[in-house]
Every structure is written in structure tokens, then in C-alpha cells.
Image (cartoon, rainbow, N blue to C red):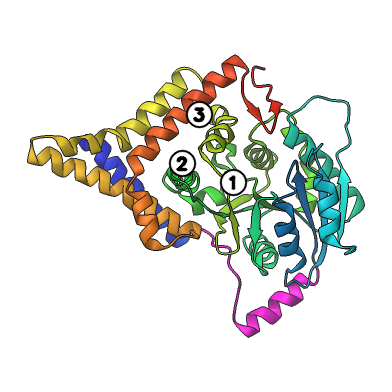
Amino acid sequence: MRIGSLAAAATAVLTVVNARTAPVIAPRRAAAAAREWDRAQEQERVTVCIPARDEAERLPDLLADLLAQRTAASLTVLVLDDDSTDGTADVARSTAAGDPRVRVATRRSDGADGVGKSMTCIDLGQRALEETDPTVVVFVDADVRLTPDALDAAVSCLRALDTTFLSPWPGQVAVTAAERLVQPLLSWSWSVSLYVRGANRGRRPSMGVANGQFLVMDAAAYRAVGGHRVTRGAVADDLTLVREFRRRGFPTAVGYGGRVATCRMYDDAAQVWAGHGKWLWSQFGRGPVAVGVGALVSAIWLIPPTGLLASSAITRRWAATGYVAGVVSRVVSRRAEGSPDSLARDVVTSSWHPASILVGTALAVSSDRGRRRGTLTWKSRVLDTRR
């Protein structure tokens, strides 16, 4: 319990360090800086790629955000309908209302097998490079919302960091209890396990962090790695892609992007379970490795809080140390992310941290079971995970 509590305290300190030193993607407000920014953006040609499957309800909001961007860059938006059944392509065309910056197409098959979204991203990336001559390629999911300065802020951060791949981590909108238990764990997981500034400087593939909801890439580097082709069979296409960049020697970076982008991934507990279940198995190893990761997580964030029920005052103090450290790490990472919630709501949600860890562990176990049985599905597609 003491070791676990000390480890929890150490990760809380690391989270505070990351909150103070990791990149933050945010608009610049000073007039002089804005003028310099605009001159730099005039040289950029930005192509935004949107993979869309059954997104007729959410896509209009994102397109409205993109068409309202305050940017001096040349902007093209590519929407690729991935065999939707709800009229996604027609909705996209109607929303664009003839705006020449928006192009809508349907995914073309290349005759090879692969995971649905990855195949769509492969096609999108090829179209972006072949048809639009971009300097920057952006991928954004249909459920993301962008502020009017989001693209300029992200592209400027990409250039300022002198990197080729930037993941501006969107602020995760969590409404229901299930969402609040799980969604904040996403940015928290790398905030407590990586010194982000150092990881961004390195090239080790395992240290690459990305969230496919919003990716910003230098077009030349994206072309050099072969676009999304390496993700063909990947359920976590974002992590596969960022690791490929690093394997090829290209720098990548992750930063807190909630000040310019937000995302509500799922609407209820069933979607949370299915959505995370489809990919968690690919991130925590298999067999003994997965068991080891689960044991480590439990030792740091589950075992210490149980000591709050002990009769020994010393045990309770150690338990309180571990529990409070976990809560602090959650609050700090959530605020650094750019949480769309109030501080009070984030504190309450963070106080559930042991329950979040328990649910997250159960999700990982269920995900691996689904992988072994070949029963994982997403958006009516069965995922081939037994290769």
C-alpha cells in the first residue's frame, strides 16, 4: 500500500509537470502576434479530411465549424462517405451549399481487406495528396467541434514545435455517468505515464501519443511514410500511424487541445463499452503482459484506497495519500486537457477515480476476450482481430 501510494504521488507530480510544460494548442490574441501569424498562414495550404460513416446528424456541425475558420491559409475540406446508410453524403453536400472549398465523395475499394475506418483514411489521404497539393494534412472526426481559430492554432503549433505530426488532444465531453467514468482516463493515461515534453523530443515509437479525433501533419512527411497505408489492419489507426512516423525518423508531438477542439465520442454506456472495447486489447499486450499491466495499475490506484477502511491510523493515512494523489492527477490532467466542464464538476468526477480504474480494467479484459473470440464490432462491422 505504501509503495502504491508513493507511486500515485509520483504520477501526480508528473501530471503537474506536464500540465505546466506540455504544448497547449490555443489561439493567440496579441495584435502583433496575430499579424505575424496571418503572414505565416498565407503560405499554408491545408486539406482537412473527414472520414464519415453514418454521421448525418453530427457532420453538419463540424462542416459549419470548418467553413467558419478564421484563417489566412488556403483551405480544402474532403468528406469521404464510408458506405453510410443515413444519407451522410447528401447531408454533407446540402450543408456545404455549393461552397467550392468542400468536396464530397464516396470511398472507393482498392480490392484489399482492412479495417473500415483505416480503409477510409487510406483513400482520403491519397485523395488529399493527389488532388489538393497541401502543405498540411488534417484528419478530424465528424463528432469533433472546432473553435474558429482551431486550424490556425494547430498549424502554427505544428510549425512552432518543428514537428511533422501533431495531435491536439480535444477536450472530451462527458455527460452521462459512464462517460465521466471512462472518457477522462484517455488524456490522464499519458499525462501520468510520460514526461510529455521529453517524449515529444524523442523518436521511440512506443512513446508516440495520438488521438485520431484530430491529427495535423506536414504533408511532405505524411507522403513519405505512405499516408495511412500502414494502418490498413489496425483498429487503433492513430497510434499505428504516429508510431510509423517515429519509426521513419520523423518527429511527432501531442499537446492539450481542448481550448480549440472538443469531442463527445459516445452518448451512453453501451457505446462507451463497445467503442473502447474495439481497441483496448491492442494497447496493453496479451497474456502475461496484460496481467502485469493490470497488476501495476491496481497496485497504484486500486489497492491504496481500500486502506481507508482499515483500523490502523497509519494505514488510513497512507491510503488517503494514495487516493488523494489519484484524484489530484485526474483533476490536473482534466484541466490541462481543456475540460469543457466546470472545475467543481471535474473535482466530483475525479473523486470517482478508483471506480474509473476498475471500469477501465474491466473494459480491457472484455476487449481482449472479444479479440480472442472474434466478436468485436463497431458501426455494424465485425472487426478482424484474430490475426
Real-space Cα separation, disc 3 to disc 1, in angstroms: 21 Å
Res. 121 image quadrant:
top right
- Disc 2 vs disc 1: which is toward the camera? 2
Which residue in the structure is indicated by mark 3? 284
Disc 3 is placed on an element classified as loop
Q: Amino acid at mark 1?
A: Met
Using the image, determine if residue 133 lies above or below residue 39.
Answer: above
Residue 324, percent across and down? 26, 49
Q: Which of the two labelled residues, at mark 3 and mark 1, occupies the earlier sequence position?
A: 1
Query: x, y percentage for residue 107?
Result: 85, 39
Q: Earlier in the sequence, mark 2 or mark 1?
A: 2
Q: Circle 2 sits on which residue?
A: 178
Q: Residues within 10 Å of mark 2 (few under 14, many from 20)?
A: some
* Residue 210 in picture, x, y percent from top left: 60, 45
Asked if residue 16 shows in the view, the reply is no
Mark 1, residues whose alpha carbon is within 10 Å: few (<14), some, or many (≥20)?
some
How much space separates mark 2 and mark 3, taking CA atoms?
21 Å
Which residue range is magenta in the image? Answer: 22-43
Residue under numbered circle 1: 265
Is 152 rendered above or below residue 254? below
Q: Outermost residue toward the bottom? A: 31
